[in-house]
Every structure is written in C-alpha cells, then in structure tokens.
Image (cartoon, helix red, strand yellow):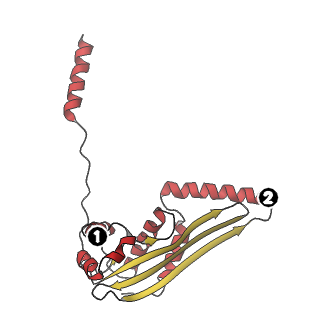
Amino acid sequence: MKVGLALAFASAFAACAGPRPAVVRPVPELRGDIAVLPFNSMSTSLRGPQLLRELTQQKLSGFGWDPVPLEAADAALRGIGISDGGQLRSIASEKVAAALGVDRYVVGMVNDFSDQNLGFVRRRIVELELSVVDGKSGETLWKNTGRFEKSKAALSRKKAELSFLEGVLENAAEKAYGKPMDQESRQAVDRAMMSFPRR
C-alpha cells in the first residue's frame, strides 16, 4: 500500500513538473566592420559550406578585421527573410548591409566539395569563390577563387582495398568531429584569401 502511494505521489509530482525549459543562448551582439554571409553551394554537402564559412571568418579575424559574429549575422539576415546563401540575389545589397550594420560583406560560392573514394583512385576536392560586396553600390570590391585537390592512386588490388578502407575510416572520423575534409578546406580558404586586404 505504501509503495503504491509513493508511486502515485511520484507520478503526480512528475506530471506537475512538466518538461524542463530549454536553455536558450543569447545571440551575440551585432557588431563588426565586415560580415561573412551564408555561402551558396553547387555541392551536395550540407556541412561543407558551413565549415568553409567558419574558416573564412577565422581568417578575417587573423587579418585584423572585426567580423560580425556568425550567429548575430544569421539572426539579422533572418529578420529580412534570408536563411540561405542562394537567397541573397533576391535582396538589394543596401538592405543586406543595413540589416548587418556594415558597409561591406563577404559572399561565397562553393563550386566543389567532393570526396571520391573508388579504391584504385581517391580524390578529395574543395573549391570556393569568395567576393567582397560594397553594401551601398552592390559593386564587387574583391574576388578570388581557392582550390585544393588531393589525389591518390593505387596500382594493385591490395593497395586499392587498403586505400578504400582508409578512406572509409577517415570519413567516419571527420563525420564524428563535424569537420569533413577539414585540411583540404583550410588549404582552399588559404588560397582564396591570399590576396585579401590585411588591416
């Protein structure tokens, strides 16, 4: 009887407690002298464009710029109906810049983000195009492309099997860390930003 009452009280309290409230992180302050917008992409990778955008943001900071925090930029863009890099062409540059509070911003196009693991041949390719847009005029102030390709060929069946297995394990590790083709991405961003103005 006592056990039954205890269970009843426990159930009642659990029902009253309800679900725990979700922890909401505050959006960073909308500040900075340049913003990196969501990248457009011709690749099938979902994480690739995000990773390249994050690496571009880090590179800008290293060059002495003060980029708007990505979360703050995304929140500001959602306010004008932008949630994807492919939507940017439909909005005037002046409106985008005003929403972000900057005079210029970086847009990116991911042309290739592919990992071909065929055993006898393995190719990992990252190619992106970066541009800086003037917020008032919409003019392109700077533009460059970065590409990095790593290829590996196996000359025997045994080496091909080993290469294929290595590729599978490497992909699994990258997926676990959420950084697909991290080294190739860094190289491509470095090459794209070689001529970017320093401060």
Q: Amino acid at mark 2?
A: Arg
Placement of the N terminus among the 4 image quadrants: top left
How far apart are the alpha carbons under marks 1 and 2? 51 Å
Residue 114 appearing in the image: yes
Within-10-Å neighbours for mark 2: few <14, some 14–19, many 20+: few
The circle on residue 77 is: 1
Determine which quarter of the picture holds residue 55: bottom left
Counting the numbered discs, the total is 2
Left or right placement of residue 4 versus residue 143 in this view: left
Left or right placement of residue 147 versus residue 106 in this view: right
Q: Amino acid at mark 1?
A: Leu
Residue of label 2:
157
* Front residue (pair 24, 66): 24
Q: Residue at x 23, y 12 (%)?
A: 2
Q: Residue at x 25, y 54 (%)?
A: 24
Q: Position of residue 69 (x, y in %)?
A: 31, 70
Q: Position of residue 15 (x, y in %)?
A: 22, 30
Q: Residue furthest right?
A: 156
For residue 174, above or below residue 16:
below
Q: Earlier in the sequence, mark 1 or mark 2?
A: 1
Q: Give the mark toward the camera: 1 or 2.
A: 1
